[in-house]
Each structure stands twice: as C-alpha cells, then as structure tokens.
Amino acid sequence: MIGELFRATLETLYMVSLSTLFSLLMGFGLAVVLIMAAPGGLRPNPGLYRALDAGVNLLRSFPFMILMIALIPVTSFIVGMAIGSTAAIVPLTIAATPFMARLVEGSFLEVNPDVVEAARSFGASDAQIVFRVLLKEALPSIVLNTAVLAIALLGYSAMAGAIGGGGLGAFAYNYGYLRFRTDLMMYAVALLIAIVQAIQTCGNILHRKLR
C-alpha cells in the first residue's frame, strides 16, 4: 500500500496548496473591499459593507460537507467533474475564502490607525495605503493566518476524501475504515499530523523573518 499512500499524500498536498492559494487571493480582495467600505474606512459604504458582511457570515455558517454536496453542479461546470482531487478544490476554495477574508480583515484592523492617517496626510492614494501601508504592516500576521487557513483546509480535504475528494481522507476511509485496517488509517493520520506540523513550522519561521 506504499504506492497508494504516496499517491494519496500528493493528492492532499495538491488540493491544499491550490485551494490555499486561490482562497488567499480571493479572501485578500474581499478583505480589502470590507476594510475600505467599513464605517471609518478609506471609502465608507454602509450598504455594501452590510451586504458583504452578511454574505461572508452566511458562507462561513455552512458545514463543509453540506456545502461540498450543494456545490456539485458548480464544480461540474467549472472543472468538468464532480469527484476527484481537482473537483474538491472548488468547494475547498469557496469554503475557505470567507474565512480567509475575516482573517485578513482582522490583520488589517490590528494596524495602528495613526500610521494610516500619517500616510493620508502625505497624500497617499487608497491603493498606496492598502498595499504599501496596511499590507506591509499586517504581512507577518497574514502569514500566520495563512498557515491557519492551510491547516483548516487540510482538515476539510480529509472530509472531502470521504465523499470522493481523494487524498489521505479517501485513503483512510476506503482502505482503513471500510476494510477494518486500523494500521492503514493510522498511517494516514500520522501523515496528516506531519503535514500540519510542517505547515505551522514554515509559518512560524516566515513570521519571525518578516518581523
């Protein structure tokens, strides 16, 4: 079973890395809109902020298993299939984007508002404030939050494996649980733990370097 275990590990890394990248980019964009439209933001827009805030909270309230099943038509339309590791990236990204948006928004809110006001007083544009002030100041926190996101997606990917998503979750379910092979299930769990430790360690190292 070494070959199958190795293939499942690669599938898990594939799902988690791409869904983390996509949800980070989309969550960052959503967080920028939220921070700008918020009361007291760079471009306050109460109506837009309330709509986005409600939408983010709504998506975050969906259990992942239900969301993955509900998104089967969307997944089939985007990637041409409903099962497999590639198909799982779509619901993983959609589930993680609002979560990442909140994490990035929180990182932005931790930035000293006096720094933003100083940039405004020097005539900085909104884009300059976002990318050269907020992002620069919040980057260490965003890096740690990205590690948190990747670890959460690792757990989601394991759940996705139970309903056709592939990866270590599918390996543990198909070869471990259904065949009563506790040893194979433990191998999959051990690999998941190792990946979690590697992600968190890399996040901590980058955080220290950026600070």
Image (cartoon, rainbow, N blue to C red):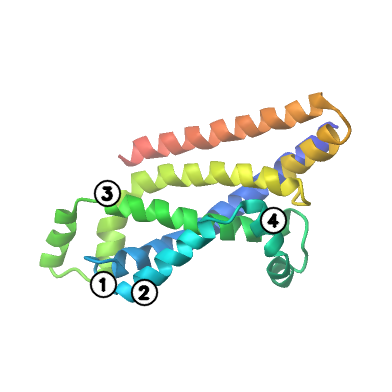
What separation in Å lies between label 3 and label 2 (alpha carbons)?
22 Å
**Residue 55 appearing in the image:** yes
Dot 2, crowdedness within 10 Å: few (<14), some or many (≥20)?
Answer: some
Residue at image x 57%, y 34%?
196
Residue type beneath disc 2: Leu
In this figure, which residue is indicated by the disc labeled 2? Answer: 48
- 3D distance between C-alphas at marks 1 and 2: 9 Å
Mark-to-mark CA distance, 1 and 4: 36 Å
Q: Residue furthest top?
A: 183
Is 209 located above or below residue 62 in the figure? Answer: above
In space, the residues marked 4 and 3 are separated at their CA atoms by: 33 Å
Q: Amino acid at mark 1?
A: Pro
Q: Is the residue 45 above or below the residue 72 in the image?
A: below
Indicate left or right for 114 with 181 as reference: left
Disc number at residue 44?
Answer: 1
Question: Is 4 situated left or right of 47 in this image?
Answer: right
